[in-house]
Structure formats: C-alpha cells, structure tokens
C-alpha cells in the first residue's frame, strides 16, 4: 500500500534553496533516503510558499492568486510517498524524517499512486485542498463521477502529467511528531489546517503561466482549491 507523508512546519527564511542551510537540510534527507531504500516510492522538496499559486472556482470564474495561503501559519515544505505493508511500518519510517523533530508529518493512505521519475526543475506540484466535511468517500457514485472528470483532465494533459493520486478520507490520517526522542501520535490530519489535502498531481510546465493554465484545469469540489508549488531540482 502507498502512503502520502506531508512534511509540515513553519518556514524559516534562512533555509532557502541555494543557501548553506538548505543544503544541510537536503543532506539530512539524503541520509534518510539511503536508510529507507526501496520504501521511498516518490517525493520532492518545494520552493517556499511565497511563490505559490492558488486556484479557486467562483461561480463560472477561475481565480488564480499568488503568494502563501494567509490562513495557514504552517505550510507543507515537501512530501514523500512510502510503499509499506501497514501503518506501523510507515510510522517507523516517518518518525525518522527531520520534519518530525521540528514540525509534524501527516501520514495518510492513498487510493492509488502513479509513481514518478526523478523530479526536474520544470516540475510543479498541485495539492488539492478540500474542506474535511466535503471530502467524497471512495467507491461512492459521487466519487466515480469525480474520477471521470479527473480521467478527462489526465487524458487532455497526459504529456505534462508526471505522477499523482487521490487519498483515503482524512479520518484515516495519522499525525506524528518527535519531541526529545519521544514519538507523539495523533489520530486524524494536521489539526492546524482548516482544510485537508484530498489528492495531488505532479506535472511539467515550461513557465509559471503554463503551470497556472494546467492547474486551473484540474477538477475541484465546490469549495476546494488547488495549491501550486514549484519543485526544487535536487539532481546531481
């Protein structure tokens, strides 16, 4: 089974791509990757939320705004996808992530996952946010109708899409922190977020305008939004 692990915390202005502090953080995650081995089925680091885009629907209009989401003090700085037999195995992996010691890691099983290659500089992440009460359960008629919309989107933008997948309901999430060596577990999603991530896409785009165009075509619930973040190229 695949599990999404989102790395949550406050953004430190001193830890920016291209700085020594950022390189030190990357080294910590590289060491984790070596330990985790084949259990890592995906993941990426993200540019700061100041450069994010947010897509919403307002009636028949599509609204795209720039910058961080003002209602969130903490942000998602990156993600992993783990392949593991059960939740206990994923928790054992996630507790080793640096983010668990200075922030939090939310772990949630995925309905499905399309693996991706090594992320590149022209890749973008689209996080699909939804109100918890508006999340549609897999297997329902509403779910099937929504999946049909996503299949049409996937067919239209197949050349750009690099991976992604939907998540199980937020009630299946576990949030973990490590403080002074002690593992702290909380059932449910990261409580400081008023919304929950309902799925994600990875896609390639030549520039910001093209990324916004693709993100604006992703199906959304009536009250949902898409957060678009550029991926940091960590290639050699």
Image (cartoon, rainbow, N blue to C red):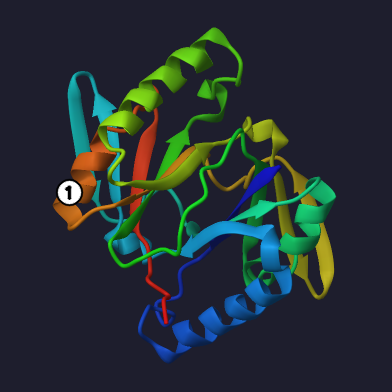
User: Residue 186 vs residue 11: left or right?
Assistant: right
Position above or below: 186 against 21:
above
Residue 82 point in image, percent of width and height? 66, 54
Residue wearing tag 1: 210
Nearest the viewer among 149 and 177 is: 149
User: Residue 83 vs residue 131: left or right?
Assistant: right
Residue 39 point in image, percent of width and height? 70, 59
The residue carrying pointer 1 sits among few (fewer than 14), some (14 to 19) or many (20 or more) residues within 10 Å by Cα, namely few
User: Residue 99 vs residue 72: left or right?
Assistant: right
Total tally of numbered discs in the picture: 1
| Residue 111 visible to the viewer | yes
| Residue 79 visible to the viewer | no
Residue at 66% in and 45% down: 2
Under tag 1, what secondary structure? helix
Residue at 46% in and 82% down: 22
Nearest the viewer among 158 and 192 is: 158
Residue extending farthest top: 141
Residue 169 point in image, percent of width and height? 63, 30
Res. 49 image quadrant: bottom left
Residue at 37% in and 21% down: 149
Position above or below: 75 against 164:
below
Position above or below: 4 against 194:
below
Residue extending farthest bottom: 20
Residue at 71% in and 42% down: 1
Q: Quadrant of the C terminus?
A: bottom left
Nearest the viewer among 165 and 15 is: 165
Res. 105 image quadrant: bottom right
Residue 191 point in image, percent of width and height? 62, 45
Position above or below: 110 against 184:
above
User: Residue 39 vs residue 115: left or right?
Assistant: right
């Amino acid at each position: 089974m695949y599990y999404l692990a989102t790395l949550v915390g406050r953004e430190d202005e001193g830890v920016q791509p291209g700085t020594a502090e950022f390189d030190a953080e990357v080294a910590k995650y590289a060491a984790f990757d070596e330990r985790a081995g084949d259990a890592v089925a995906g993941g990426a680091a993200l540019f700061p939320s100041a450069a994010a885009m947010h897509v919403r629907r307002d009636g028949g209009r599509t609204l795209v705004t720039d910058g961080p989401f003002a209602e969130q003090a903490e942000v998602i700085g990156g993600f992993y996808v783990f392949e593991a037999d059960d939740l206990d195995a994923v928790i054992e992996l996630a507790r080793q992530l640096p983010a668990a010691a200075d922030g939090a890691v939310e772990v949630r099983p995925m309905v499905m996952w399309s693996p991706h290659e090594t992320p590149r500089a022209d890749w973008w992440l689209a996080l699909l946010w939804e109100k918890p009460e508006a999340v549609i359960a897999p297997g329902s008629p509403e779910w099937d109708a929504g999946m049909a919309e996503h299949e049409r989107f996937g067919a239209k933008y197949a050349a750009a899409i690099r991976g992604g997948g939907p998540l199980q309901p937020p009630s299946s999430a576990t949030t973990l922190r490590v403080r002074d060596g002690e593992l702290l577990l909380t059932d449910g999603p990261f409580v400081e977020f008023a919304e929950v991530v309902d799925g994600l896409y990875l896609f390639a785009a030549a520039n910001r305008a093209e990324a916004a165009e693709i993100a604006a075509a992703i199906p959304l619930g009536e009250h949902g939004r898409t957060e678009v973040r550029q991926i940091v190229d960590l290639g050699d």
